[in-house]
Amino acid sequence: MSNLDARRPPYPWLGGYPIAVLAVAGASLSVMALNSNAPVAILMLAVIVTTWFGGTKPALLALAASLPALFYALPPHGSWAIDSDQIVRVPYFLGIGAFIIWIIGSERRASAALRRAHDALQLKNEELTLVIDTIPAMAWILLPDGKLEFLNRRWLDYAGMSHADAIERAHVAMHPEDAARAFDKGTRAIAAAQPFDDEIRLRRADGVYRWFLVRTVPLLDEGGRVLRWYGTSTDIEDFKRAEQALRESAERMQHLSRRLMEVHEEERRHFSRELHDEFGQLLLGINLHLHAAKSVAGDAARPGLEESTALLQQAVDKVRGLALELRPTILETAGLAATLQWLAGQHQQGTGLTIEVRGELYEVPADVAIACFRVVQQALTNIVQHAHGQQVWVELDQSDGAMEVVIRDDGRGFDVAKTMQAAPGTGHLGLLGMKERVEILGGRMQIDSGLGEGTRITLSVPLPHAVPAITAAGTPA
């Protein structure tokens, strides 16, 4: 049962009529027994009491019921008759009584309306408190100046504090490392009357800290003034742990990918060396024997030996080209910029493309140099196979802590989003491999293209000073 129901009388039909009867009876007895010279005042007191405690209708009854006592009290005393000069006091009594009933009745109705509004508001507050205590979140209310006014039951149960204690000492539940930042952010938001949110750790009743997403919004009046602040704290501990596990997994994956790239490059270096040193020496020995054979062979055998020598030279050039493509030694001796110039020249000779390399690079870490070389190498291969352009520009730039390489072409372009989405299914992993190489180094690669608009690939890679670098002289920096 609500407080409003408890205040209603058990017999509403009875109303204040018993009050009227008792008040008039008491006043009438007093007038008759005391033979009072002021009957109007005594009887009017009964009307006033009935009006205030019983209401307007019982008061009108009390006013009418007081007339016999008034007739009895007016001269001649002890008789129901009234002197002619006293008859004017009857309408006077009725007029004053009616006016008093109207005044007190209006006040009583206003007081009753105010009481009903207060009861309704109290009921709404009780219902709102019940809702706030029931919602699956920790909630609170702040005054316009930021002082705590209310904390819901879930918040109190979590912190293990009473409401009075929490109102004064809620800040002790915050982790010391988060408190200063949260207070500073909250103070600035309150001063600006703007919503704010933050991630902080709150201490549980057992002393364990958990991560919460704290959000606070202002309730504004029509003039933009803050009436209250309402806030919630949502437990994100599990999300934080999952985020941390995902981050650690990504770091391990990146480390493994980087290690795989290193092993792959090491295998390329080893195979390039084998081709150049072992197979190259073997071909060189065969070439020497052919030249020796030509000097002693007859004229009939000379054309065949000449053709064999030419074919052997082609094989030597092919092996040398494969070795350089696998692992260009110029990258280790002359630096990345010179290697990209050489790569551009190789592609120009083999494809007819016009490739222009602009810009200078200085100290570039070895792993960054290898990755950038592979990205440019793959980009030029893609241009030849898919873009069908005529002109390519490779722009190099290096600033403190970062290096940027831009590859542009005037080819037919493509739909970047569609191509990247379809790449895993089609097996065309060139662009994805380029992007992965750059991201393994902590960099980013952006591809801008459109049908008929050519393509622009921008890769930006940080240059950590602690990583050994390859300089233009080929020595580690």
Image (spheres, rainbow, N blue to C red):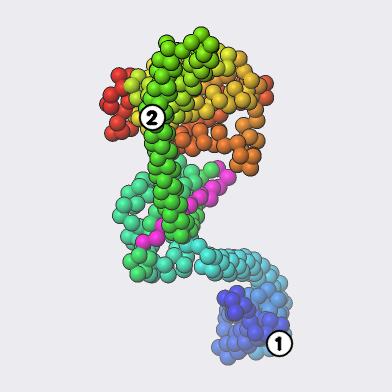
Magenta-tinted stretch:
209-223
Q: CB of mark 2 within 8 Å of CB of mark 1?
A: no
| Structural crowding at the residue carrying mark 2, measured as other residues with C-alpha within 10 Å and reported as few (<14), some (14–19) or many (≥20) | few
Q: Quadrant of the C terminus?
A: top left
Of residues 223 and 195, the one drawn nearer to the viewer in this rendering: 195
Of residues 353 and 82, the one drawn nearer to the viewer in this rendering: 353
- Secondary-structure class at tag 1: loop
Q: Residue 414's spot in the image, x, y percent? A: 65, 27
Three-letter amino acid code of the residue under disc 2 = Glu
Q: Is residue 91 left or right of residue 179?
A: right
| Structural crowding at the residue carrying mark 1, measured as other residues with C-alpha within 10 Å and reported as few (<14), some (14–19) or many (≥20) | some
| N-terminal-most mark, 2 or 1 | 1
* Nearer mark to the viewer, of 2 and 1: 2
In reply to whether residue 421 is colored magenta, the answer given is no
Q: Residue furthest top?
A: 299
Q: Residue 356's spot in the image, x, y percent? A: 50, 13
Question: How far apart are the two marked residues, 2 and 1, measured between alpha carbons?
Answer: 148 Å
Residue ID for mark 2: 278
Disc marking residue 80: 1
Q: Residue at x 54, y 26 (%)?
A: 379
Total numbered badges shown on the rendered structure: 2
- Specify whether residue 328 is in view: no
Q: Is residue 176 above or below residue 19?
A: above
Q: Residue 64's spot in the image, x, y percent? A: 71, 79
Q: Residue 190's spot in the image, x, y percent? A: 43, 46
Q: Is residue 123 left or right of residue 377?
A: right
> Quarter of the image holding residue 164?
bottom left
> Quarter of the image holding residue 74?
bottom right
Three-letter amino acid code of the residue under disc 1 = Trp
Q: Residue at x 55, y 47 (%)?
A: 221
Of residues 67 and 401, the one drawn nearer to the viewer in this rendering: 401
Q: Residue at x 71, y 82 (%)?
A: 13
